[in-house]
Image (cartoon, grey):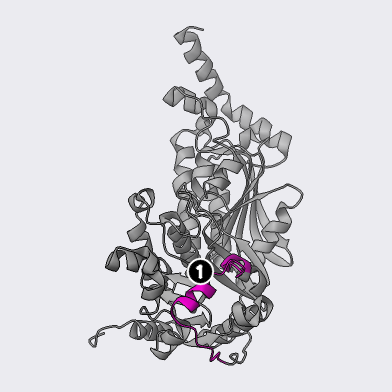
Amino acid sequence: MSDAALGSKAAELWAAYPKTLAAARKRRGRRDAVEVGVESFDGLDAVVARLDFDFLGGSMGRDHGDAIVAALDRATRDNLPFVSIVRSGGARMQEGFDALFQMARTSGAMARARKAGVPTISWLRHPTTGGVHASYASASDVLLADRGATLGFAGPRVMHALAGVFPMKGSHTAEQYFADGLIDELVDESTALSRIGVWLRLAHPAARVMPTPAEMPEESTRRLTGWDALRCARDDSRPTARQVASEVFDTVAELGGARTGTNDDVMFAALASLGGAPVVVIGTDRNAVGPNGYRGAPTAAGFRKAQRAIDLASRWKLPIVTLIDTRGADASTPSDRAGLANAIAETAVALMEATVPTVAAVVGEGGSGGAMALAVCDRLLMQDDAVFEVIAPEGAAAILFKDPGLAADVADQLGLGAAELRTRGYSDHTLSGPSFAGAAESNGVLRQALTSQLALLSRQSADERGAARHRRYGASEGN
């Protein structure tokens, strides 16, 4: 086809747009591709936007943008979560820049909702691409996606037209997005709405109840030091922090990643409930393998996942619990070049500045700065068979004596045992651990302690908690 013929064909398509739009409205019985209203999930109301792909590919023009902005602003005004159920090919090109401008408008409405602490959830269906994907859909706090769905900013034909290549096989799939930490959960159509209900139950403003008051469990007087303590902390039979979380909390819904393109399974972050009270849980799983192949060592991506969870907790006013069990952060060259030191530092700063109650529990080994970043909390609890060390004894022996085999001798000098840290005032309470009490009993003790501490802290104002936290971590006399 000649250039002139192509130009004429394009002009015809654009000229026919009003009729095409009118026909779509008549055929689908709606004004545009999006329909909004209030729906109930598990007894909790949310403002919902549903996209109709059969209406001009679910594309976004002025009317679509108007509907999303109105829905988000209603959610903000009425303090209701916002749920979008998305199938879209992107911005409606027939409306030109006016369609593109809706990305900014809907993003602005999303920003207002975030500032007001409104939880937002998107269910991404097949396909979800273009300007809708790159605005309110992907900006939601929690992202679910259909298994097998095509996801991506640009579809295959657009990529080929602009870059001269087609996407790699499997690159634009929900499964790849999940593996890369870009979405939080893969769902099936038959269970997606119930899964949205689970997430809403944990995030909904109406479900934010105060933790139930409870007495602190009796403090353990067992005293393990040095290498003996470290052997207990590293025992292969010891439950991992992820296993502890699954037993201590009633419901656990893990966040998929930090949306940076690399997921780190060593660091986990989740919405959870404790006795009916929603909380955010962050922890390190010593048995999980990170993106660089190291077991139990969180990377920069892991710490950024933790930062994402801290941000959600602060915006949603949910307490934070951290569960610490790691020999230390992944200090390999790829991890270091990805910004490990900065990620550790920013995680500690985020916890220091969190406006919600924060409790850390060492449930195994607390290894150096990677563990310290998760311990900057209002309260620090330790199991009696756990340790917290400035450096792994093997590393200390290698530095001091050029012989990692002297780790046991060095461990005795590091003062890493729970009893030692309690005596020196660094921890607030020593709990019975699994080496002595058994996993079931130690999990029950931890649950009681967390419930007690969160109930006490929740009755303080954010200013009171913040001032006490800064005093705890050594604010200068002038502050």
Q: Which range of residues does the magenta coloring cover?
A: 219-243
Q: Quadrant of the C terminus?
A: bottom left
Point 58% across, 62% down: residue? 75
Along the viewing direction, whichever of 471 and 369 lies nearer the viewer: 369
In which quarter of the view is residue 58 placed? Answer: top right
In magenta segment, residue 242: yes
Residue 245: % across, % down: 61, 70
Question: Left or right: where does residue 207 sit relative to residue 6?
Answer: right
Amino acid type at image mark 1: Asp
Please determine whether, in this image, residue 29 is positioned above or below residue 307: above
Q: Report which residue position mark 1 lands on.
A: 325
- The residue lying toward the viewer, choosing from 291 and 461, is 291
Q: Is residue 418 above or below residue 295?
A: below
4 or 117, nearer to the observer: 117
Up the image or down, 252 lies above or below 472; here it is above
- The local secondary structure at tag 1 comes to strand
Q: Where is residue 38 shown, x and y percent of the image?
A: 68, 59
**Residue at image point 61% right, 75% down:** 208
